[in-house]
Image (cartoon, grey):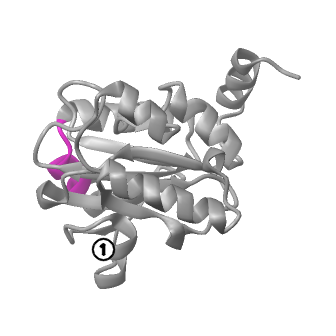
């Protein structure tokens, strides 16, 4: 079996993230920019000392509607047990800090097609899937760039451009806030996903 380092180099060298496994490999190793605080189990969360609300998301093969937001650790543990009873093992789940949705500015997906940016976005202050149910907007070209530049800190904008340098044909999913967020300093934007699948 290939080592993690070899797989990581291979993915970066191709400039494409073709599946969830590759995405999580890079994401969990901190190679896709600013991210929320993440954990792989309820036990990890407790050991970290985190006391605030958390979200639960499924890895590959778990339906998006199984995601839960803004749970206490106690409620999250109960939900993990419920999913286990439904046949979804805890190893198929990932956990992250709840994001400050009241501070959201813009969130969505951006990609480049022959160096022309296309943005699908929302300004609704809710988790992205729910926000898109209420408002889905589109922008292209200069309008898209101006929306991004107008809502991202310069550090976050630089991070986004760096991701496009490595993954020029990928879709980048993000959320931007009016405050610092995530595991990197002086950033207001979380990168949720970088993908070609």
Instruction: Where is residue 143? Give x, y as percent.
Output: 26, 63
Q: Residue at x 17, y 28 (%)?
A: 186
Q: Which one is in front, 108 or 166?
A: 108
Instruction: Give the magenta part as a residue range.
Output: 146-153
Number of labels in the image equals 1
Q: Which one is in front, 49 or 125?
A: 49
Q: Which one is in front, 97 or 44?
A: 44
Outermost right residue: 1
Q: Residue at x 31, y 31 (%)?
A: 158
- Whether residue 145 appears in this view of the structure is yes
Instruction: Where is residue 78? Give x, y as percent.
Output: 45, 59
Q: Residue at x 38, y 54 (%)?
A: 55
Q: Quadrant of the C terminus?
A: bottom right
66 left or right of 150? right
Q: Is residue 183 above or below residue 109?
A: above
Q: Residue at x 45, y 31 (%)?
A: 44
Dominant secondary structure, magenta: helix
Q: Is residue 76 magenta?
A: no
96 left or right of 9? left
Residue that carries the numbered disc 1 in the rendered image: 131
Crowd band around label 1 with a 10 angstrom C-alpha radius: few (<14), some (14–19), many (20+): some
The secondary structure type at the circle numbered 1 is helix
Instruction: Where is residue 59? Give x, y as percent.
Output: 61, 52
Q: Quadrant of residue 35?
A: top left
């Amino acid at each position: 079996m290939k080592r993690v380092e070899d797989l990581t180099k291979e993915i970066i060298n191709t400039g494409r993230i073709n599946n969830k496994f590759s995405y999580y490999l890079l994401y969990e190793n901190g190679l896709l920019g600013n991210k929320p605080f993440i954990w792989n189990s309820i036990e990890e969360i407790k050991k970290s000392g985190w006391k605030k609300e958390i979200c639960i998301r499924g890895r590959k093969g778990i339906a998006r509607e199984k995601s839960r937001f803004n749970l206490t650790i106690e409620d999250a543990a109960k939900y993990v047990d419920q999913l286990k009873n439904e046949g979804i093992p805890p190893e198929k789940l990932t956990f992250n800090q709840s994001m400050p949705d009241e501070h959201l500015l813009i969130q969505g997906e951006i990609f480049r097609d022959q160096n022309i940016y296309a943005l699908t976005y929302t300004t609704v202050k809710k988790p992205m899937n729910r926000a898109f149910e209420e408002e889905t907007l589109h922008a292209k070209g200069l309008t898209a760039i101006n929306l991004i530049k107008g809502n991202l800190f310069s550090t976050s904008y630089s991070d986004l451009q760096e991701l496009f340098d490595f993954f020029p044909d990928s879709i980048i999913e993000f959320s931007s806030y009016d405050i610092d967020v995530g595991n990197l300093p002086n950033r207001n934007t979380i990168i949720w996903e970088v993908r070609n699948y």
